[in-house]
Amino acid sequence: MSLIKLKNNALANLTSFEGSASLGDMVLISSATASSSASIEFDLGSYKEYKFFLVNIHPATDQVGLNFNFSTDNGSNYNVTKTTTMFRAFQNESGSSAILNYETNHDLAQSTDFQKTDDTIIGNDNDQNLCSIMNVFNPSSTTFVKHFIVRTANTTYHDYVTDTYVAGYCNTTLALTNIKFQMSSGNIDDGKILMFGLN
């Protein structure tokens, strides 16, 4: 097994590895920067997997969450039926309260509602935000349901940090054509979302 070293000084400029690994087929398809945006939408295509990086998502409103939903009709409607599960760990700044629990009130059971990425209590202080990594698997399939996984870290309005996991599936054999991100209330004040495709 060879040692792999990055050849570039910054990940933003990464083009190759030394050693036996490569970047493979992961391609940056699109990115969007929020500026008091009501929502951010992306078109989905025929990649086998889509990977989203949600970076420093800052809400305009205090005590809100970042939600998402899918479309099968090119963005006319965001109402795909989903079944999901969510659990989280959190800790406060003083170290006096740490909890790991299953979030029964944030999962969905055959619902067309928007799915939460977090526990809906992001703070809007200048230094508070949310960061997530999301994987959507084979959205263009017309045979199988479509699975997704989301892992989120965020700072809350009452100075906790949370580590939230969401997994689920879209219960449709129609191809997913779009995805939309929006706050549970108010605008996305700032932040960037990058969409990569993998074959």
Image (cartoon, rainbow, N blue to C red):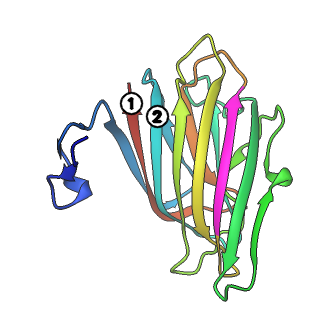
Q: Please rate how many residues cluster around mark 1, counting C-alpha atoms within 10 Å: few if below 14, some from 14 to 19, many from 20.
A: some
> Can I make out residue 55 in this image?
yes
- The percent position of residue 148, horizontal first and vertical second, equals 60, 36
- Chain-order first, disc 1 or disc 2: 2
Residue wearing tag 2 = 50
Mark 2: secondary structure:
strand
Q: Residue at x 52, y 19 (%)?
A: 140
Q: Is residue 116 left or right of residue 125?
A: right
Specify the amino acid type for callout 1. Answer: Leu
Specify the amino acid type for callout 2. Answer: Tyr
Residue 32 versus residue 19 in the image, above or below: below
Q: Residue furthest bottom?
A: 94
Q: Which residues are magenta?
A: 162-170
Mark 1: secondary structure:
strand
Is residue 38 in the magenta section? no
Q: Is residue 62 left or right of residue 133?
A: right
Q: Which mark is residue 198?
A: 1
> Can I make out residue 66 in this image?
no
Q: Which mark is residue 62?
A: none
Residue 34 versus residue 173 in the image, above or below: below
